[in-house]
Image: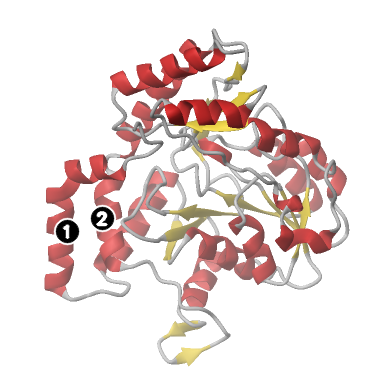
């Protein structure tokens, strides 16, 4: 089986370094907010190009506490996309705000700025774009809308670490950025982890309080917070992996280019294009299958190739958001994407022979039409 992702290959390459890092943490005995957490916060902030970063328990907590820090709550609206993972709207719900969905641009799978502008009301407090599959949303247009209407922009960077527009990193383009270090991410921990990044010191300080039970000083609590701290062992592992991130991204981009060139010959497979000023980091390599997507996925599986569908049901059609009363047809581009997208194997350790095998299997699968 050619997997869509094989974390064991990366771990075997880094095992001696990771084993030493874990042993060092165990020897020092500083397990909570220790030196590795502080160092990783500084290193990731420098990588993204912002002055402040705060380590957290997960990417979901990063979104949640970003909204809390911005004082967004009941009665407020946050505009976002229905074509994303549930954590995006979960965070909005956690603060008591209301998600307002707008459709995606079918060419990019990311939120359509024109639709954002049309959805703004007096209750709108923020825009929450998702940089899906590792491709940045149109932040120039989104930022212009936000500035015009005095709105915050919370970037969902769970899949986009290292992605850039005109050389500027995602996470540095809005008011605050939220990252995930879930193991499958391009920069993944050996467990959960997350981080917010921002240029605003006051926002960073607020998130630091919120992650520690609402306390800036231990045992002196200013507000009700949560327990959301990046683990010291995970920070030590992430510091090692950060040094390899750009190398891994370039390998992902090489694989993506290989797929793009080879699959361009198949009329039923849509591979799309990326502007020259955008650095897509290919957390996923996702194609559109114009006909019988599920049958194609089944035939690939029979040939020993794993694929995934991100995401099979847009959020407005999920039971959790049934109370919004948004029927099928509300967001046609998102709904069509859910019926056509198929993600192919992509990770830095994917072998050249495996890439060729994926392409060949797709060519054989297309021949049945």
Q: Element at badge 2?
A: helix
Query: Badge 1 local density, few (<14 within 10 Å), some, or many (20+)?
Result: many
Rendered location of residue 366, percent (x, y): 55, 14
Q: Give the colouring mode of the picture.
A: secondary structure
Where, quadrant-wise, is the C terminus in this rendering? Answer: top right
Residue 124 visible in image: no
Residue contact between numbered discs 2 and 1, judged by CB atoms under 8 Å:
yes
Q: Element at badge 1?
A: helix
Taking depth in this image into account, of 148 and 184 the one nearest to the observer is 184
Residue at screen point 52% across, 82% down: 214
Rendered location of residue 38, percent (x, y): 32, 64
In the image: residue 92, left or right of residue 326? left
Residue 77 visible in image: yes
Residue position for label 1: 21
Name the quadrant containing residue 228. bottom left
Taking the view exactly as shown, the residue that stands out farthest to the top is: 265
Where, quadrant-wise, is the N terminus in this rendering? Answer: top left
In the image: residue 21, left or right of residue 32? left
Rendered location of residue 280, percent (x, y): 50, 30
Residue position for label 2: 237
In the image: residue 234, left or right of residue 153? left
Residue at screen point 48% across, 34% down: 307
């Amino acid at each position: 089986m050619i997997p869509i992702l094989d974390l064991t290959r990366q771990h075997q390459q880094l095992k001696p370094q990771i084993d030493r890092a874990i042993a060092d943490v165990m020897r020092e005995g500083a397990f909570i907010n220790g030196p590795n957490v502080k160092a990783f916060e500084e290193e990731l902030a420098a990588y993204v190009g912002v002055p402040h970063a705060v380590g957290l328990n997960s990417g979901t907590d990063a979104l949640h506490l970003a909204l809390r820090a911005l004082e967004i709550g009941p009665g407020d609206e946050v505009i976002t996309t229905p074509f994303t993972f549930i954590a995006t709207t979960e965070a909005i719900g956690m603060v008591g705000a209301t998600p307002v969905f707008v459709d995606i641009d079918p060419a990019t799978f990311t939120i359509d700025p024109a639709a954002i502008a049309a959805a703004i009301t007096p209750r709108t407090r923020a825009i929450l774009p998702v940089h899906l599959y590792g491709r940045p949303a149109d932040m120039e247009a989104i930022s212009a809308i936000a500035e015009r209407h005095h709105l915050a922009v919370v970037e969902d960077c769970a899949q986009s670490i290292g992605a850039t527009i005109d050389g500027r990193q995602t996470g540095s383009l809005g008011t605050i950025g939220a990252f995930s270090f879930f193991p499958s991410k391009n920069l993944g921990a050996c467990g959960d982890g997350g981080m917010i990044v921002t240029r605003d010191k006051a926002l960073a300080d607020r998130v630091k309080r919120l992650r520690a039970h609402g306390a800036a000083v231990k045992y002196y609590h200013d507000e009700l917070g949560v327990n959301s701290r990046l683990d010291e062992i995970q920070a030590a592992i992430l510091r090692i992996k950060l040094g390899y991130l750009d190398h891994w991204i370039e390998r992902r981009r090489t694989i993506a280019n290989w797929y793009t060139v080879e699959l361009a010959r198949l009329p039923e497979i849509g591979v799309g294009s990326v502007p020259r000023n955008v650095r897509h980091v290919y957390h996923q390599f996702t194609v559109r299958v114009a006909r019988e997507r599920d049958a194609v996925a089944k035939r690939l599986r029979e040939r020993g190739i794993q694929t995934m569908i991100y995401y099979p049901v847009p959020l407005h059609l999920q039971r959790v958001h049934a109370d919004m009363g948004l029927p099928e047809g509300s967001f046609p581009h998102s709904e069509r994407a859910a019926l056509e997208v198929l993600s192919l194997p992509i990770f830095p350790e994917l072998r050249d022979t495996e890439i060729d095998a994926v392409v060949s299997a797709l060519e054989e699968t297309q021949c049945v039409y």
